[in-house]
Amino acid sequence: MKMTKSMANVLLLLTSVLWSSGFVVTKIALDANVSAGFINFFRGFLFVVLALIFFHKKIFKMTFKAFKIGLIAGLLNFGGYITQTIGVKYTTPSNNAFISATYVVIVPFIAWAIYGKKFQVKSFVSITFCLLGMVILTGILNEALTINIGDVYSLICALFYAGSIAYLSYGARTTDVSIVAFMLAAVQAIGGLVFFLLVEKGQLAGVNWSVAIVPLLYMGIICSFVGQTVQVLAQKHTSATSAGLIMMLEGVFGSVFSIAFGFEIFTVELVFGGTLIMLSLILMEIDFRQLLIKIRSNAKG
């Protein structure tokens, strides 16, 4: 059966739900004393195994050029994963989800600075909304004038993800998706292991494995392998704008899961801050020129 655009959008919505559930699952694993490095190693290792099972024919034919492209993409991606994992340890899953999602606003700057892509005026408006939303969400303007260290890590994560997305869009366009996916997984596994052994000193003695094992398996199998595979499949059958708007709901679902699992309470700041960030992300994805042309065309018709 041929996949329609509507079916593809439903699959992307499913991917968004799966990824957003990962914020809460990561929090559960961290609360069970699993370190950020080990989480990334375990998650990447499962992804590598599953990628080899399903994509081994293309992976074993990888060229050196594809390897270099995948390595760069993997390093950027790992930077995002490790800082996001550390960030959710010190802030709420909701803040982590929303702030990490601001990569959509940062991508145009990187694309303009490195790849010479045209910088649109709407980006300034979008960034204003985004920064205002972050101020409200993080409480940076409170009496102590402080910001949660977890929020800082989440913002650094957004920078890494923005670099990764820009690179995959313009620097790795000709490389097979399955090879890039494998390299993302491999670098995450190796990077997580190195971080775990050198920075975290390989500490596993205090881990509550009865609590941690299910979240770890869920992150590796569902959030990483299933989520990314479904995303790649679905994006071939829908527009980039539709995909971007749907995937940005990850932040919204992340808050829903966080509140549902009791990691935070429902607050006015969460609503207003999150709404402003979502508006900034949506603004970045809408092509107003094409929208205006379509409106005029419909009016004439």
Image: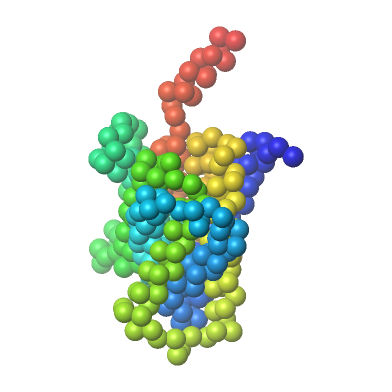
User: Residue, x 38% and y 77% (percent of image)?
Assistant: 196
User: Residue, x 44% and y 29% (percent of image)?
Assistant: 287
Question: Quick one: 275 or 243, which is closer to the camera?
Answer: 243
Can residue 150 be seen here? The reply is yes
Residue 184: percent from the left, percent from the top?
44, 58
Can residue 258 be seen here? The reply is no
The quadrant of the rendering that contains the C terminus is top right
Residue 191: percent from the left, percent from the top?
37, 69
- Tally of marks: 0
User: Residue, x 60% and y 75% (percent of image)?
Assistant: 214
User: In the image, is residue 139 above or below residue 171?
Assistant: below
| Residue 120, quarter of picture | top left
Question: Quick one: 10 or 143, which is closer to the camera?
Answer: 10
Question: Quick one: 241 or 94, which is closer to the camera?
Answer: 241
| Residue 96, quarter of picture | bottom left
Residue 200: percent from the left, percent from the top?
34, 80
**Colour convention:** rainbow
